[in-house]
Image: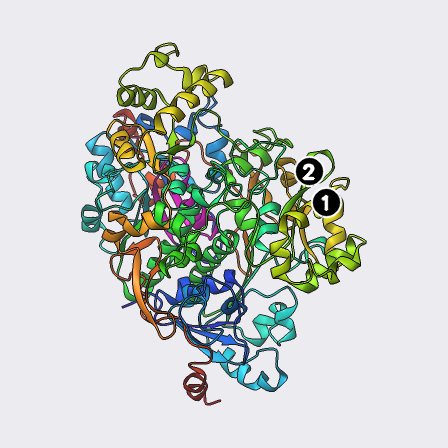
Amino acid sequence: MTQPARGGPLQGVRVVELTKVWAGPYVGKQLSFLGAEVIRVESRESLDVTRTFGVADIDKAPGFQAVNPQKLSVQIDMKKPEGIALLKDLLGKADIVVENLRPGAVKRLGLGYETVRQVKPDIVFVSMGMWGSEGPLAYQTGYAPCFAALGGVSLLVGHEGEAPAGMNVRYADSSFGAAAAYAATVALLHRRRTGVGQFVDVSAVECMSSMIGDTLMQSLLGGATPLGQGNRNPGMAPHGVYPCREDEWISIAAPSDEAWAALCQAMGQPGLAQDPRYRTLAARKAAEDELDGLLAAWTAGREAAELAAELQGVGVAAAKSQSSVDLVADPHLWGNGFFREVQTRQGEPRNIVGPSWKMTREAAITDAAPRLGEHNAYVLGEILGLSGERQRELTEGGITR
Amino acid sequence: MSALRAYRVLELAEGVAGEYCGKLIADFGAEVIKLEKPGTGSPTRRLGPFGGQGPEGERSGLFAYLNTNKRSVSLDPADPAAADTLRRLLARVDVVIDDHAPGWLKGIGLDPEQLSVTYPKLLLCSITPYGLTPPDERRHAEDLNVFHASGWGYHTPTGADERRPPLNGAGRFLPSYEAGLEAAMCIVAALYEREGSGRGQCIEIAAQQVLASRVDYVLGQMVAGDMDVSTRRNAFDLFGPAGIFRCRDGYAYIWMSAPSHWDGLRQLLGDPEWMKTFPERWLERECTPERVAECRRHIAAWLATQDKEPVAAAAQKLGLTLVPVNGAEDLKASPQYRHRGYFAELEHPVLGRSLYPTVPYRLSETSARLESPAPLLGQHTAGVLAGEGA
């Protein structure tokens, strides 16, 4: 019943998640991949919607499983006072708690930071909100594309001279989670050195702004904010995405005159590199429409991956624009362990998106996402030390299931 | 007390990813010593935006943003004459951050493979586009290429016209910022372990994987076989009338997926005739392309007569998720950003007094702080090297 030691830098750290959907669970996933024991507290009475999207079986929801591998699940009814009491006992045994419930919800549940501190003075309490936990707009809520719109990201994505198009709708939740996970590790390390816990207050909108920090800096130094520039970059030309055969696309960037000369060589037009119209970056920027036209005409008949490899061979930064088929078939992503196999509780293999990193001493990642309440016995019996009889009472009383 | 005050970091990085990682750690109080090539310094010193008036190399707003709270030492780690000094520095730091191409570290005597022998207590973090062992066809990459290798590029924007090229992400360096953030988290986690074990280790961050992991909710379903993969540009998309619309003074983003949003819109518009022709739960159950197009047409006509802030405030009160599409000027004026102090002031000897974006988290005991501006090239050479007895 005891959880096997998995190793990794955060082995021995216990995280309790009161999270929903994507951003909050992403924090737990990062910490779990670093070796922490991550326990999701879930209520059948207020299920995470990702457990129900598109399926009848809440234990087999694809979206939920995608973001919650290697976690534990305990089912506690948070609408009953006994459930809240039980949860407080669990928080008393935790190092970190992460919450991304609606603004004010944890306080209404009687689980705000000041309350939790009473039972666990050195807890690292991570609170995630669209605008952070306090301030004139903290009451507002939204979804990932709202974070991107509010934080300044969406305005920058678009074809030149057109309305902003924004990032893909999926962007923002996971980046928000990544920022919260970093702040949590910092607070955890501080606690290890000093014994002092703290409240970590993370803002999704600010997280988006931090992904365009240099653009904001431009405005803060008195410059204009650039709008969508298509695929262009003030410091490189060419810098674009060009059509290939069968609706494929290739990205090509030339950060220097040398890279441009190598590209001209590959195009079989070495003379272009010395052509005064294109010789310097300034010249290429001035003639960029024409330049992009030349490249697009050249790439149009080619196969994208093959052309990217050819350009790499002469030192040019190029990559196929990967579709979802390309991604799941990317041999480098499999070879690096980024895609990897874990086991469900039934012993069936399941592929997951693993950690983005490698380290010398990393955590073992072996388990698929938990079934609802799969780890009730471990959490109630081993962590909280409740007798079998008491556990049965809680189940009969509908507090746990 | 700042959370990372006890640690000393040597930054060998010369790109945005590594410098951003170093900044995230320096802003929590770690002593970050940045090695810069004598004479030229970091390449980011030559990238805009530029401000102020003064020596070339000291006017970059990019460098100023990425290197707050750091110390600059003029020393070329690849110069054989500097090898002894470098070794002494390496022996006295806790962490090294690098973002050069695979093989570069070995060339300066810091082979990741030999780390446990040469510097057993050191944490060495390498950030590269594809990791330390890329295939031959992935040796060269700029952020644009990483964005496209990760899958984000092909699927940006949502609802793309498939005849037009996919679009780059926001700004120049989003992939680098994401990778730098991931690296900082791994470094701090490894420092946590080192407090107990006393051992260093090598951390390898691949930006392509960081970005791909940011779409795990979708990609995880695809790799598990639960969601179809395809060559469609809309394979990551959610469908429905959500999107960006023009307003009188800019743009607004509206999200609609549930009956409560539809109801909020009805109240905001005063129960218009066109809404009565839609089934009550069409968003969830009967979201046809024709209805989406008609709904979008009406929203577009209406929002074109509205100002983004007031209409967003009214919508939020009715449970409709509508927000302004903000630019830098809007954020500078945001009462929420002011409340949380997202922008903080620093005085830089060349750029002068300016606000800087800070970080998206506030810690009650040990918040990140901007204490000193980015260093001038070599500003701390004498002090740091004297401290090393070098």
Per the image, label 1 sits on a secondary structure element best described as helix
Chain letter of the residue carrying label 1:
A
Give the mark nearer the N terminus: 1 vs 2: 2
- Would residue A343 be counted in the magenta stretch? no
Residue A39 image-quadrant placement: top left
B321 w.r.t. A260: above or below: above
Q: Amino acid at mark 2?
A: Glu
A381 w.r.t. B349: above or below: above
Q: Which stretch is magenta?
A: A13-39
Q: Which residue is mark 2?
A: A248
Q: Which residue is mark 1?
A: A305
Say whether mark 2 and mark 1 are on the same chain: yes
Closest to the observer: B194 or A19?
A: A19
- Residue at screen point 61% across, 87% down: B81
Closest to the observer: A134 or A152?
A: A152
Residue A84: percent from left, percent from top:
23, 36
Q: Nearer the viewer, mark 1 or mark 2?
A: 2
Q: Amino acid at mark 1?
A: Ala
